[in-house]
Amino acid sequence: MENQEKNNGQLQIELKEDVAQGTYANLAIITHSTSEFVLDFVRILPGMPKAGVQSRIILAPEHAKRLLKALEENIAKYERACGPIHISEGSILPPLPNVKGEA
């Protein structure tokens, strides 16, 4: 608490170098229970029979809803600045019948 008071109540967020580079994912698998949402970010590579989960984020339902609102606001800002994001029917993946998860 003292540290926040010294910084005028602002939270300092540290971005470590290895995290700052980011991780590419082209599929998100979302599951939930009554107490949490689990977001698995996956990288699918052409011709590869297996796809690896690159990152897993676990959120409380309230935080998942805040994330949804933040994404909606940021997509709207992006589209105002850069134009609409077009998603063709073929680019939306249907449920993947052969996806097998391993925990």
Image: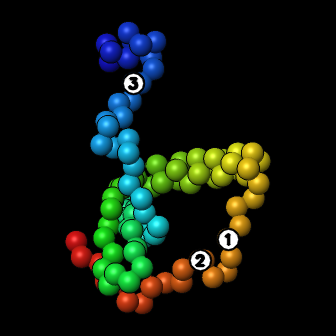
Kind of residue sitting beneath label 1? Ile
What residue did someone put label 3 on? Answer: 12
What residue did someone put label 1 on? Answer: 87
Q: For marks 3 and 1, give the CA distance.
A: 36 Å
Instruction: Answer left or right for 55 relative to 77.
Output: left
What residue did someone put label 2 on? Answer: 92
Q: Is residue 49 above or below residue 20?
A: below
| The C terminus: image quadrant | bottom left
Q: Give the SS element for disc 1.
A: loop
Q: For marks 2 and 1, give the CA distance.
A: 7 Å
| The N terminus: image quadrant | top left
Instruction: Answer left or right for 92 relative to 8.
Output: right
Which residue is farthest left? 103
**Residue at left offset 60%, top offset 77%:** 91
Q: For marks 2 and 3, give the CA distance.
A: 37 Å
- CB under 8 Å between discs 2 and 1: yes
